[in-house]
Image (tube, rainbow, N blue to C red):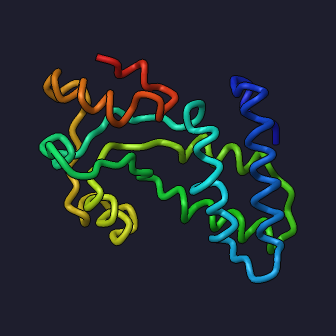
Amino acid sequence: MNSPPDLDPQLHAALKSIYEEVMWLSARPNVTAGRARAWYTHIMAEAVKRKLRHFTGKVSEAAVAQSDGQLMLEHFKRIQTTLTTLVEKHRAEQLNAPDLFIKTLIEFEHVHIVTRAENYAAMRAKGNYLEAGIVLLPWENLPAKRRAELWQKMLRGKVANADAFKP
């Protein structure tokens, strides 16, 4: 499998290196697939998020209304669970398939803006927004002032497509 033709070669190389690191970690004694996956989600994603992570244009009602408190970029496609499963499979089957890892990242590095409480509710509901009580609103329906605040706080410098939502 080859990387997507429009993927920047430097980004591809960085993601391939991260895959190799994750898989090396997963082969270490007493390192679970989840811990190895955390190398990407909790450490290395910072290095690539500005080129890889995409905002969907959806914001929860609660995030729009919340004037203080914590807001989050929520991976609604369950990136952590998906990557852990991928690492488990690659480890068990002794696969070396960085392009599958990269393709998965491209597909799953999509985020909505939600509150911290909603993020945890979504995790408990295994991504079922209805069950979690999360209602999403399209970016273009938000008041201009709130879009500007959210762009500044949540998107600028944090997602690859921030300029598409710039006020």
Q: Is residue 36 left or right of residue 79?
A: right
Residue 147 position by quadrant: top left
Quadrant in which the C terminus is drawn: top left
Q: Position of residue 88 (x, y in %)?
A: 71, 71
Q: Is residue 18 left or right of residue 142?
A: right
Q: Is residue 78 left or right of residue 40?
A: left
Q: Residue at x 76, y 39 (%)?
A: 14
Q: Position of residue 36 (x, y in %)?
A: 70, 66
Q: Position of residue 134 (x, y in %)?
A: 22, 55
Residue furthest to the front:
68
Query: Vertically, is 94 above or below 72?
Result: below
Front-most of residues 43 and 1? 43
Q: Residue at x 83, y 72 (%)?
A: 27
Residue 96 position by quadrant: bottom right
Q: Residue at x 70, y 28 (%)?
A: 7
Query: Vertically, is 116 above or below 67?
Result: below
Q: Position of residue 4 (x, y in %)?
A: 72, 31
Residue furthest to the bottom:
30
Front-most of residues 7 and 128? 7
